[in-house]
Amino acid sequence: MRIAVPHNTTRAEAKKLVEQRLDDLQRQYGHYASDLEKQWNGDHLDFSFKAKGFNGKGTLEITDTDVIVDGKLPLIAKPFEPRIRSSVEREAEQMFRRA
């Protein structure tokens, strides 16, 4: 599942906003997810987690204009892809609207 959202700011500011939001989400929903791992390499983030017995992983890349999330969903989650996509898009748009 690949999602691109314009960030309307600099790469550095977009990265800062993403990192802040990830920290907020971890505090808010951390009890649903475990084994969260994230590794930044410049403007590229590799992440993985476990939620409700399923593994999730993906990447997030910050370009000059967009934040691109590419996530791998387990087969059992495929029916929920439209709902997950919508939630990620809505969250990202709100986050960057404030920028």
Image (spheres, rainbow, N blue to C red):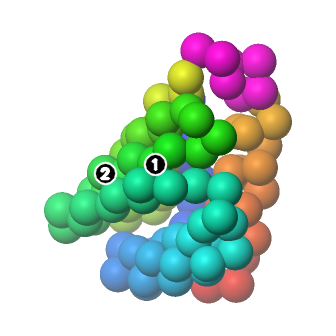
Residue 11 percent coordinates (x, y): 36, 74
Residue 12 higher or lower than 64, as above or below: below
Quadrant of the rendering where the N terminus is positioned = top right
Circle number at residue 30 = none
In the image, 28: left or right of 5?
A: right
Quadrant of the rendering where the C terminus is positioned = bottom right
Question: Local crowd at mark 2 within 10 Å, few (<14), some, or many (≥20)?
Answer: some
In the image, 96: left or right of 34?
A: right
Amino acid carrying mark 1 in the image: Phe
Q: Residue at x 77, y 49 (%)?
A: 87
Q: Is there any visible trace of residue 65 in the rendered image?
A: yes
Residue 53 higher or lower than 66, as above or below: above
Residue 10 percent coordinates (x, y): 41, 79
Query: Which segment is the magenta one?
Result: 75-81
**Location of residue 98 (image quadrant):** bottom right
Amino acid carrying mark 2 in the image: Asp
Circle number at residue 46 = 2
Q: Residue at x 50, y 44 (%)?
A: 50
Q: Main secondary structure of the magenta part?
A: helix
Residue 83 percent coordinates (x, y): 81, 36
Magenta-colored stretch includes residue 74: no
In the image, 93: left or right of 25?
A: right
Q: Between residues 60 and 67, which one lies in front from this camera angle?
A: 60
Residue located beneath label 1 in the image: 49
Marks 1/2: CA distance? 11 Å
Residue 5 percent coordinates (x, y): 59, 54
Q: Is there any visible trace of residue 63 in the rendered image?
A: no
